[in-house]
Image (cartoon, rainbow, N blue to C red):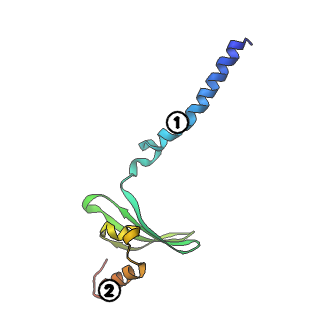
Amino acid sequence: MPAGTVVSSLLWFIAILALIPLALWLLKRTPAGGSSAQGLMRSVAVLSLAPHQRLVTVEIGRGDARRWLVLGVTGESITTLHEMAPQDDALAAPQSAAPFSLLLARLQHKNENGDAH
């Protein structure tokens, strides 16, 4: 095999190897790669209860259809514990977050007063 053919084949091989990460990066950022739902769901807060148990608050939807779901997440299942209207984003910000016990007390107080979720 001539030296020019070997060098040419080696350069093509290197070029194809270099294109693989680029193709994966592009796929991750296109609707075909599954990022089309971006903006329809976001994580608001996570509270770890045990090694495999968490409370997770997620926001779903856009505009007037936005809702917050409080989910119980374990290794075996995800359960919707509560659904509510979106709260002020200041409550979800870590620097000004209300303690979980305070938020839970507010929810219990609302439910005791007959407010349904």
Which numbered disc covers residue 22?
A: 1
**Local crowd size for mark 1, using a 10 Å CA cut-off: few (<14), some (14–19), many (≥20):** few
Q: Spot the residue most to the left.
A: 64
Task: For marks 1 and 2, give the CA distance.
Answer: 53 Å
Secondary structure beneath disc 1?
A: helix
Q: Amino acid at mark 2?
A: His
Quadrant of the image occupied by residue 11: top right
Quadrant for the C terminus in the image: bottom left
Front one among 80 and 4: 4
**Circle 1: residue type:** Leu
Q: Position of residue 86 (x, y in %)?
A: 31, 68
- Marker disc for residue 76: none
Name the residue carrying label 2. Answer: 109
What residue is shown at x 59% (from left), y 29% (from top)?
16
Determine the residue positioned at 33% across, 82% down. 106
Residue at the far right: name it: 1
